Image: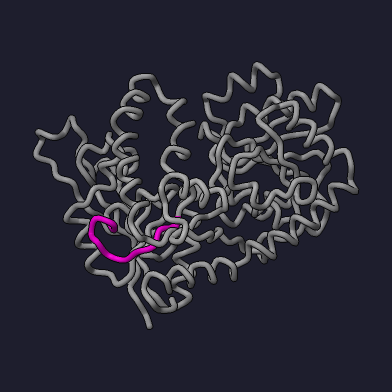
Amino acid sequence: MSRSVLIVTLPPLTGGVPAKTEILCRHLRSLGHPVTVSHYATLSDYPELVVPSWQMLSGKRPAMREGQCFGDFSSVAVGCRFPELEFQYFKPSAFWQELIESHDRHIAVGGTTLASYPLMCAGIPHLVWCASTMIADRVDRRAAMPVARRLLDRFIVGSVQRAMEKKILSASTQIMAVSSYTRDTLIKAGGNSENISRVPIPVDVDRFHLPSTPADTGVIGFAGRPGDPRKNLGLLFGALKRLLDQGQSVTLRLTGDEPSELSPVIRRLGISDHITWTGWLDDDALPEFYRGLDIFVIPSLQEGLNIAGVQAMASGVPVVSTRSGGPEDYVIDGETGQLVGFDEKDMAMAIGDIVSSRQRRDEMSAKARAFAVQHYGRQEFADGLAAAWQQTWGETP
């Protein structure tokens, strides 16, 4: 039976959350369900829809705007007052209530569980698909904030959001965690283990496939948001410097544009000539990016999953990753890649060992591809969603 589905999420622009939201949208549509993507409007991206503190006396009111995302999916951006305080995005409002009441089924998709707060307050059955707890998601970003904002975040914004998260976790909502790490951290934060299942983000293993010709030796790759402090690119740059000093013939290829805050680090290490920034790549260009790599690296401080690592493995690229949470589900040490600590010497050694041995690299490549196909195909995701859907609404999706 067709059900109108409302997805509540963050702005569907760039990053891991919009990527998994699109996957969910397309899967639900394939099952015959019409889908609407609703998301909160941020001050930076939708200033016309929100009312910040300095406009409170202007007579301006929050607004809601319809549009499209992911091609032709209906979307609704929902504004609020005081968007400087991030928890305001999630507070119930007449806009959220109208959207909730006009749909049959409801799913929140976010980095954390917080996107589900309007659904929880409405008292309706719903699903949540997330990657992290609020604290794990925030701690490294908070450390990079200016002092005044850091204090505001720690004592006001963070405290309110942690209280909101506790309410969500104490409810009987079915939560789909993208990794074993996510599930464990949600349980430690107060979630009920019986209500939290692992539902990984799937990868299109037909699009992300082995290259027809081998990639050049020594091409190291990274894909993600380079300006996000959690990505910890300084560690990767330090490892690259060590490899170059050892006489290794290596280059680093990164998606996106060079963030201004990283430029001084790159200049100080003297590695500019060995780094290439691709600019932002759309989804169609990503498979070719991975197929041009010899090895993929995740230097992150914390990851709920890091879907880029799985996409690289599906493309036959071994992954070197820090022990940052989610990647430990699929980087099988010594088989599909290598796990390392937060030390540039260890990371350089792991990269160098793989790059310098073609036999080892090719064996890891085959195992990486096989693991991605077996554990991150569409079926495991579809089965996990179906089980959570059945538990929530007593029906198959």
**Picture coordinates of residue 13 (x, y %)?**
43, 49
Image: magenta residue range: 119-129
User: Residue at position x 77%, y 57% from top?
Assistant: 211
Q: Is residue 104 above or below residue 342?
A: below
User: Residue at position x 35%, y 28% from top?
Assistant: 154
**Picture coordinates of residue 268 (x, y %)?**
65, 16
Q: In the rendered view, does 163 fall on the left or right side of 54?
A: right
Q: Quadrant of the rendered structure where residue 9 is? A: bottom left
Q: Is residue 239 visible?
A: yes
Q: In the rendered view, does 330 fall on the left or right side of 135?
A: right
User: Residue at position x 47%, y 38% from top?
Assistant: 136
Query: Colour mode?
Result: one colour
Q: Quadrant of the rendered structure where residue 155 is? A: top left
User: Residue at position x 32%, y 42% from top?
Assistant: 42
Q: Pick whichever, 332 or 48, lies toward us.
A: 332
Q: Quadrant of the rendered structure where residue 7 is? A: bottom left
Q: Is residue 292 visible?
A: no
